[in-house]
Image (spheres, helix red, strand yellow):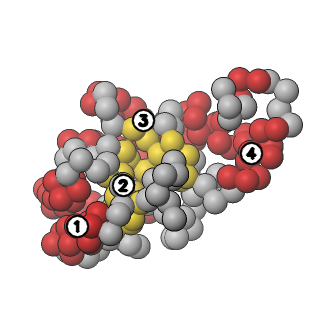
Amino acid sequence: RLAGSSTIPCCVVGFPLGACTTKSKAFETQVAIEDGAKEIDMVLNIGALKSGNYVLVHDDIATVVSTAAAHPVKVILETVFLTDEEKIAASFIAAEAGAAFVKTCTGYSGGGASVMDVALMKKAVRYKGNVQVKASAGIKSLNACLEMLEAGADRIGTSSGVAIMKDAETVPNESHRSDN
């Protein structure tokens, strides 16, 4: 039913905490792409990151990126569990491993995107030039959406798209309308 639409099918691997093996994530990625996924979201191995096993974190991401081939991979950090230092490390590692995006969180574990996290993540990947930031979870209004974009988000993940677009219809400033 998505054929011919602008919708991009995406699949999440390693949900919810990224604790499964790299081999499992690679298999999930391969099957998702065979089944039509055009993008892959992977949950960072939070336990490995928090224990300082940066080699495992890098190799986990790099394997999924390699398996995904030309399909963009977004690495979900689950920022609610991380210190600022861990958010910087995770963003840097994801960029070095070839991720197309770093993403704040799934929303599954509570919390949500924050302006501070988006700005921190953007600063951590800016050196790479081609890694983007996706703010996701808890973005329920046009104002929140605009704040995330101003903080450096390149993409927004929300389940409140209809409400946000209704808000946009009432904004007098034409530069915030979706058709511009």
- Cα separation between marks 1 and 3: 29 Å
The 10 Å Cα crowd at callout 1, few under 14, some 14 to 19, many 20 or more, is some
How far apart, in angstroms, are the residues tagged by discs 4 and 1? Answer: 35 Å
* In this rendering, the label closer to the viewer, 4 or 3: 4
State the image coordinates of residue 74 (x, y, percent, origin top left): 36, 52
**Disc 2 or disc 3, which is closer to the eye?**
2
| Dot placed on the residue nearer the N-terminal end, 2 or 3 | 2
Residue 122 is tagged as: 3
Residue at the image position 57 percent from the left and 57 percent from the top: 137
* Amino acid identity at mark 3: Lys
Percent x, y for residue 84? 41, 47
Point out which mark residue 165 bears: 4
**Above/below status of 10 relative to 16:** above
Tell me the kind of residue under disc 1: Gln
Q: CA distance from mark 4 to mark 2?
A: 24 Å
* SS of the residue under disc 3: helix
- Residue 89 visible in the current orientation: no
Q: Point out the tag, 1 or 3, that comes first from the N-terminus.
A: 1
- For label 2, the residue is 39
Q: What residue is disc 1 on?
A: 30
Q: Quadrant of residue 50?
A: bottom left
Secondary structure of the residue carrying numbered label 1: helix
Q: Which of the two residues, 41 or 52, is positioned nearer the viewer here?
A: 41
Q: Residues under labels 2 and 3: Cα distance?
A: 20 Å
**Horizontal and vertical percent position of residue 176:** 71, 29
Q: Is residue 96 visible?
A: yes
Identity of the residue drawn at 26% across and 76% down: 20
